Amino acid sequence: GVLQANPTGEQSYPHLSDLGGASAFAASSEFARVTSSSPLKLNYKDAAGKLNQDAVQQIVQIRDLSDMVLMDYIMSQADRFSGNMHSEKVYLWIDNGVVKSESKKDDPAKADEQLKKIPGGAVLVNRMIMKDNDAGLISGNLAKTNHLLEKISHMDSKTYDRLLDLQKELQKPEVAQWYQSELLFTSADFNTMKNNLDQAVAILSARKGNGLFLDANVSAAIGAADNQATGT
């Protein structure tokens, strides 16, 4: 946790922060969307051509939850499902076919000024923050013991590609040395993380195209919907 930025003004993630334990998370309606065996087919724009807040929130949440499970699997997180899920409010909008985003200001006066500059078609969604991460690489791995990664059916294609890139980097001796000298990982910490990552790649690559859809890329999905709407 000390290696991450420490954002302020975060909120407990709606509903999920109130669940107790990995089993409750796995049984939640939110995680059910991540594990759905059907490709994502959401209407990101309404009949008037404006962004559909509910649909945008859904794909953002699916992306965030699959990313969270993967990260917790790699880092042997033992304390995620006891209220340690946070979120921030983020504006999303489309500018010339490109999805833009901006975090909502915490201060009410600044938030009012910010809103005057945000495009009228923007939607406000909850974006997950993984803030409380100090129980990683200590003992236990809730994502692994509860087989959460194996259940994921939707993931951001960028996350998957970066996972493969990271696996290659961790093969390099100089990278292992950097983790130990700069991030102060013990050799045991590094080996645990590396082994977890190798296992994650094996699980996900075996299911790619056979139950795992790389369709939770927010920018690609919303941008494609915008291009279809404008005929480009």
Image (cartoon, rainbow, N blue to C red):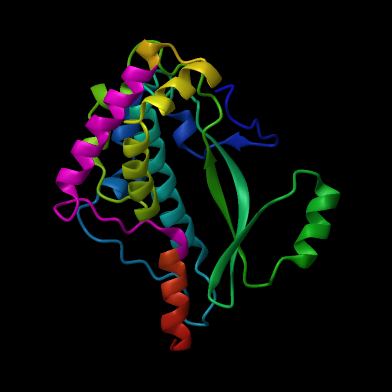
Residue at horizontal 36 percent and vertical 35 percent from the top: 69
Q: Quadrant of the C terminus?
A: bottom left
Q: Is residue 167 above or below residue 215?
A: above
Tell me, yes or no, whether the highlighted magenta stretch contains residue 29.
Answer: no
Can you tell which quarter of the image residue 12 is in? top right
Image-based side of 127 in relation to 167, left or right? right
Q: In which quarter of the image is the N terminus?
A: top right
For the record, the magenta segment spans 190-219
Helix, strand or loop: magenta stretch: helix
Q: What percent of the width, then of the height, locates residue 163?
A: 35, 42
Image-based side of 146 in relation to 31, left or right? left
Q: For the view shown, which residue lies furthest in the right direction? A: 109
Question: Looking at the image, which is closer to me, 140 or 169?
Answer: 169
Can you tell which quarter of the image residue 137 is in? top left
Q: Is residue 47 something that shows in the picture?
A: yes
Q: Is residue 23 something that shows in the picture?
A: no
Q: For the view shown, which residue lies furthest in the front direction? A: 174
Residue at horizontal 33 percent and vertical 48 percent from the top: 160
Q: What percent of the width, then of the height, locates residue 85?
A: 50, 32
Q: What percent of the width, then of the height, locates residue 132?
A: 54, 24
Q: What percent of the width, then of the height, locates residue 174?
A: 42, 26
Image-based side of 25 in relation to 127, left or right? left
Can you tell which quarter of the image residue 87 is in? top right
